[in-house]
Every structure is written in C-alpha cells, then in structure tokens.
Amino acid sequence: MRLVWQFLAVMAITVVCSVATKAVDGHPWPTLALGLLTAVLTVLVYGWVVRRTEHRAVTETAREGAVPAILRGLVIGLVWFGAVIANIAFLGGYHVHGIDSPSGAAGLFGFMAAAAVTEEVLYRGVLFRIVEERWGTWIALALTGLLFGGVHLLNPNASAWGAVAIAVEAGGALAAAYAATRNLWVPIGLHFGWNFAAAGIFGTEVSGNDTPPGLLDATTSGSPLVTGGDFGPEGSVYAVVFGALVTIAFLWLARRRGTLVPLGGRRSGRLADVATLPR
C-alpha cells in the first residue's frame, strides 16, 4: 500500500500543476514559475508521504549534497545529448538556422524541471525503489524501464521504436544512476540536462511531444534511424548507444560500491549503509 499512497500523492501534485501550466497557455514566464514550483512541491510531498508510510528519514532527497549531485547529473545529461547532436550533425542531419526564442527557452527550463522531478520521483523514487526492494535491481530496472518507455507511446508523435529507445536509454540510465548513487538528485539532474539540452538549447523535438521553440531555430533531416524522425533525437540510434554506455557506467559504479540489490530483494526496504556512500 505504501507504493499506492506514494504514487497517488505525487500524481496529485503532478495533475494539479499540469492543469495550471495548461491554463497559462504556453506563456514562458508563468510556465517557468509554475514549473519550478511543481518541482519543489513534488520533492516536499514525496518526503512527507514517505515519512508517513515508511517511518524513516528520506535520505534519497536529503538536502546535504543535493546541489553538487544535481550539477553532476546535469553535466552528464548535457554532454550526453551534446554527443548525440554532434554525431547527427556530423552526418548532415542537424541544421541551425539562427536564434529562435530565448524567452521560450526560459519557459522550457521550468517545464523540463517539473518533468524531470516528477518523473524521477514517480519512476525511480517510488516504483523502482520499491520494486527493487522486493525483487532486486535487475528486475526493477527491466520492469520500470519498460513501463517508462511504454508511457511515451501516448505522446502525439510516438512510435514503437521511440518507446523502445526511451526504455533502453532513459529507463536504463536513470535507474542505474539511482542504483549507483542512492539519491534522486543525480537522476533528476541527468534527466533535466538531457531534456533541456534537447528542447531549450538545441531546439529539437522531445519524445514526440510537439515541443515549443527553444533557444536555437534548428531542424533535422535524413534517416529517422540517425535523427529520430518526428520522435526527436531520443529515437536516434546514437541516443540508444550512448544511453547504453551511460547505463553500463552507472551499473559498474553501483557494483563497485556494493549498492546492487540481488534477486529476491531486501525486505528491510533500504540499504543499511546508504547514507554513508560517496555520491
């Protein structure tokens, strides 16, 4: 039942703030403010409901070390997406036509902050963490990765390949980042860095969502296997390959730190030494 209560509590914030964001009709500055408010409220509500249902300190969203952890994830996300775009551009598939909308980029900053926090709290903080406790890291990674990819089939320009790509590159890398660090800040920074780089900086489509304009006025052309087509660069084979490498790196780090939960899980609900791990 704790999974149900935690999921419902976070979803309530997500739904309310989503309705409020739609009400401002894409105006960038209100979107920025609402996005940041959503991110803060989501973390606070998650901490509250976990304390109420699990009667423990919520170490995965502890304030100590939060900023450096977010920045580490942010840098990885920016570099990761930058590498994807660089490879697409090298093959002539990405074209910049000029500056598009700096104010739009500000709105996307808030929107992507809200998306990164709510999705990481739901999928890694609630679902992955609780499934991992019962059945171990590998099963939790596979199940939540498939679910994370599957929900992207609901997007306007979704495709089966895009959902598979998201499951592999994002579902894998973000869950592995949590498994290695045992905090939500690194996955949040990673998720935000990737999404904001895609839409806010490079002006590309994000997960087939008809993303509004960002900083650069840019287009992609060529093989969908390279560019991701209407789904955006997340559907590029480069995104999948680099995402798999990020996943492997985090899983290697988790194995080295001893934070992988074996098959069968741990009924205690958390690793005893998680608070003392380097992050």
Image: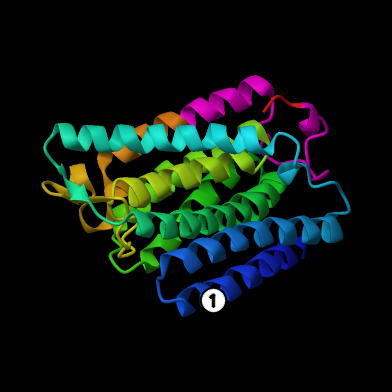
Please state if 203 lies on the left or on the right of 10 as rendered.
Answer: left
From the image, which quarter does the C terminus lie in?
top right
* Residue sitting at x 70%, y 24%: 278
Within the magenta stretch, is there residue 51?
Answer: no
Report x, y in % for residue 247.
48, 33
Q: Find residue 103 and report its image quarter.
A: bottom left
* Residue type at the position of mark 1: Ala
Closer to the camera in the image, 141 or 45: 45
Residue drawn at the location 44% of the way across and 38% of the way down: 77
Above or below: residue 30 compared with residue 247: below
Q: Residue at the top extreme?
A: 256
Label 1 Cα neighbours within 10 Å, binned few <14 / some 14-19 / many ≥20 = some
Q: Give the range drawn in magenta.
A: 247-276
Q: Mark 1 points at which residue?
A: 20
Q: In which quarter of the image is residue 20?
A: bottom right
Percent coordinates x, y for residue 174 in the rendering: 52, 42
251 falls in the magenta region:
yes
Q: Nearer the viewer, residue 20 or 231?
A: 20
Q: Residue at x 66, y 41 (%)?
A: 136
